[in-house]
Amino acid sequence: MDTAGIIQTVSLVCIIGLPIIGLLFGSFLNVCISRLPQHQSVVRPRSKCPQCGAAIRWYDNIPILSWLFLRARCRDCQAAIPWRYLLVELAVAVWFLQIAISIARTISFRVAPPRDLAGWYINFGIEEAGLLILGFLLIGLMVMDWQTMTLPDSFTLGGIAIALFLICTQALFLGPNEDQVVLSNHHIQLTSPGGVTDHGNLFFTGPESLIFGRVAAICGAALLLLLVRWAYRAIRHRDGMGLGDVKLLAMIAAFLGFWPAILSLFVGTLAAAVYGAVLLSRGRAGATSRLAFGSFLCIGGLVSALFGNHLINMYIALLR
């Protein structure tokens, strides 16, 4: 099989296989959404009906199909199964499909392969895996915050740990001089204990630049929201934002970087403001009503993950 045939096969496998995997992850995500806010294990016990307590049979736990076959009702007590279960499974599947399409487009339209082709594919795979994981986490956090006003640390802090692991792994496969950052063009002397003198530029290697840059992005994003939180508390003498939102923005920065995280914050704030204005106009909220800001921040993160670089480049072009 020639290269074009291999690329087409890989693209087809991604477009068909990833959404199916997304459905399975969506089913598991529903378990996380139901149990994590209650500080319960997502492994044991087996899933059961919250109304009658009957254990859910394996053939009643097939994503989408079981929900449709049972007509959204428990087999034992006929209690209604919320739409949330179906929508979460569909949302994760659609997210995985979107990433699959992005993978297919990238490998199909790549004209000039890099020198280190294997390293490029590994780094590209790590980046796309990070987007899959980020979407899974954001969809789950969005629903959990909307329903319970909580953002579990197992998702936010766990997401930061996963992102840093992926970044460190990606740094291992960087090509020579890739992502290297020169800090100074002036020659400096580096004298060893043996008295040997060398001349060169001050720079960060690719791995140092990648890892330290992402750590700085996490700290910068968290510090920004902490400053907003402290300022609000100093002015209004009450908390207006939870630490969960701070951890959530730091998690987005861990996966995407600082400026995409700031774009997420902007989109989330704008969406929350529009939603709040609609509630106020209908008399369904007051000036002190609480909003699930984390849910809107998750929406911003999803938008930034898909279109962040394009939107940021457009904004930079407008400033030139």
Image (cartoon, grey):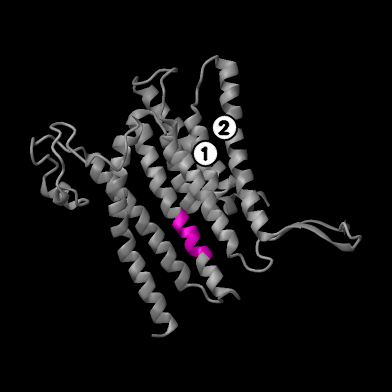
Q: Amino acid at mark 1?
A: Leu
Q: Is residue 95 left or right of residue 317?
A: left
Whichever of labels 2 and 1 marks the residue nearer the N terminus, that label is 2
Could you say which is closer to the camera, residue 2 or residue 283?
Answer: 2
Q: Secondary structure at mark 2?
A: helix
The quadrant holding residue 119 is bottom right
Residue 305 position, x and y percent, is 48, 51
Visible residue check, residue 173: yes
Q: Is residue 89 left or right of residue 132?
A: left
* Numbered mark located on residue 225 in the image: 2
Point out the stretch of residues depicted in magenta.
123-130
The quadrant holding residue 277 is top left
Identify the residue at the far bottom of this view: 1
Q: Secondary structure at mark 1?
A: helix
Residue 121 position, x and y percent, is 51, 69
What residue sits right under mark 1 in the picture?
249
Q: Residue at 34% of width from left, 61% of height from top? A: 18
Mark 1 is surrounded, within 10 Å at the Cα level, by few (under 14), some (14 to 19) or many (20 or more) other residues, namely many
Q: In the displayed structure, would residue 108 be above or below residue 129?
A: below
Q: In the displayed structure, would residue 125 be above or below residue 293?
A: below
Visible residue check, residue 310: no
